[in-house]
Amino acid sequence: MSGAGTLLPAVLMGALMLAGLTRGVDVYDALLAGAKKGLRVCLDLLPALLALFPAIGLLRASGLPERLGALLSPVFSALGIPEETALLLLLRPLSGSGAMAAASELISRFGPDSLVGRTAAVMLGSSETTLYVAAVYFSAAGSKKSRWAIPAALFADLVCFVSSAWLCRLFWG
Amino acid sequence: MLSYALTALYLAGILAAAAGGNADAGGAVMEGAEKAVEFCLALVGPLCLWSGALELLERCGGSAVLSRALRPALGRLFPVSAADREAFSALTENVSANLLGLGNAATPAGIRAVRRMGELGAGAADELGLFVVLNTASLQLLPTTIAALRAAAGAAAPFDILPAVLASSLFSVSAGLLAAALLRRVWP
């Protein structure tokens, strides 16, 4: 698994390059154009990281999470979700860069291969910025009545968070 | 909204630090800023590499191939929109770009799709809701940004979370579609 897992990115890149060449795509140019877009994403993300990392650092150093943990943990342990992901869950439907910053903080604090780090990554990877996306599409459609769509979408998010936590515990717990 | 959350985080941190008597908690703020930059720098490499791969995928026409493959399934899910050529082509383009993780292509196509669905009137209202639910769940097959985040933090195999991400996405999309199917019957 680990051998195949580490080779996967290289194999994918190679396959894409071959596919590009056979279709007459300028492979080098595409890679450069994509990298530029990637830089843009990093540039957009950095301010969010700079806003959130210090705030989380302050909160952790204050010792409040340990005391609050006793309050939160019954709910989170009933759902089977690590309570460290509370901030990520709160931000996920609202802000893409905010959620990415919160997940990055968990991944770098606990380590990418820790259970919390993996859970944060899976939660982030299997959900979207629900409220933002819904707002964009409903306003583009000129529709003021979103009716059941947002409750259904938020229910899907809840299922996503719970299943992410359970799957991670199952695979790596 | 985020302004309130951030201010609340700071105030809670300051109050708890003062109450607990650990004034050096303030040092954590500067340290956090340093860590943020370090993390972002580590992210640049993997993220740019994957963005390049995705750009290549887009230029190879990956989206168009997938669109054709998806037409029958999406036609059943969106019968009213499927009857309208413009709405359906934008819709399939959006879903296939989402599956491939091509956010730059997915959003404009999605906006074209919902505009047209809005013009189709009340008959397409339920399908508009369904389309939004589908878009608020993650359809992406390869979580490249997440893999880049994990690579930046030094993961042994950044993509080894793939099975969990796919399974979780599948559960979440199914839950969204199921909730939509139930709610649209009872919601006025």
Image: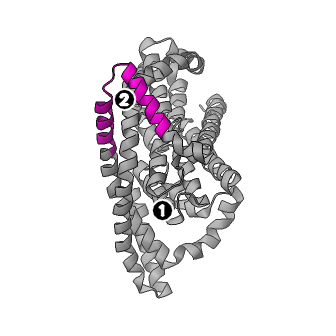
Boundaries of the magenta span: A10-38
The image quarter in which residue A139 lies = top left
Q: Residue B108, which numbered label?
A: 2
Residue A102 image point, x, y percent: 46, 58
Q: What residue sits 34% from the left and 73% below the top? A: B30
- Chain letter of mark 2 equals B
Identify which residue is drawn at 37% across, 79% down.
B27
Kind of residue at badge 1: Ser
Tell me the element at label 1: helix
A133 vs B167, nearest the viewer: B167
Element at label 2 = helix
- Against A99, residue B113 (above or below) is above
Left or right of A163? Residue B10 is left
Judge whether residue A88 can be spotted in this image. Answer: yes
Q: Which residue is mark 1?
A: A108
Most frequent secondary structure within the magenta stretch: helix
Q: Which residue is at 32% across, 41% downward?
A: A35
Residue visible at 60% across and 63% down? Answer: A83
Q: Are marks 1 and 2 on the same chain?
A: no
User: Which label lies toward us, 1 or 2?
Assistant: 1
Q: What colour scheme has been applied to the protein in the rendered image?
A: one colour
Residue B36 is situated, as x and y percent measured from the top left of the image, at: 37, 63
The quarter of the picture where residue B187 lies is: top right
Membership of A36 in magenta stretch: yes
Is disc 1 in contact with disc 2, using a CB cutoff of under 8 Å? no
The three-letter amino acid code for the residue at tag 2 is Pro
